[in-house]
Image (spheres, rainbow, N blue to C red):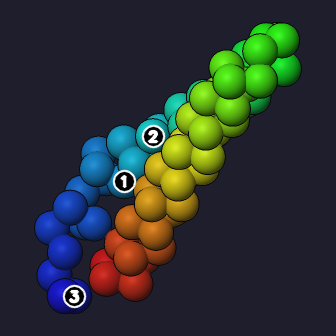
Amino acid sequence: MSNCAPCNNATFISLVSEAITDDLGAISMYAQMAKMVDNLALEALFTGIVGDEYGHVRTWMTILALCEVNS
């Protein structure tokens, strides 16, 4: 897989990096929102969304790491 077309595309790499930044910002926002509610069910929902966003960040970082290996 040494010829990974998206990995050799600077725009693709930039968009993946931007997605990481955006998801990290979303994590901060959703964590703040979780602290603002006084309902345990809502807090749990927001906390779950935070976990989902962490998963997205891990996925994007894996994509970047694979691109580094394959470029």
Front one among 31 and 41: 41
Q: Is residue 14 shown left or right of residue 12?
A: right
Image location (x, y in percent) of residue 7 = 28, 66
- Residue 11 appears at what percent x and percent y? 29, 45
Residue tagged 2:
19
Label 1 and label 2: CA atoms lie apart by: 10 Å
64 in relation to 47, above or below:
below
User: Which residue bears the numbered disc 1?
Assistant: 13
60 w.r.t. 25: above or below: below
**Image location of residue 37, percent across then percent down:** 79, 11
Could you tell me which residue is drawn at 83 percent across and 11 percent down? 38
Disc 3 designates what residue?
Answer: 2
Q: Secondary structure at mark 3?
A: loop
Q: Residue at x 61, y 46 (%)?
A: 51
Contact between labelled residues 3 and 2, with CB atoms less than 8 Å apart: no
10 Å crowding of disc 2: few (<14), some (14-19), many (20+)? some
Q: Position of residue 35 (x, y in %)?
A: 84, 20
Give the structural element (helix, strand or loop) at label 2: helix
**Residue type marked 1:** Ile
Q: Amino acid at mark 2?
A: Ala
Looking at the rendered structure, the kind of residue marked 3 is Ser
Residue appearing at x 31%, y 82% in the figure: 70
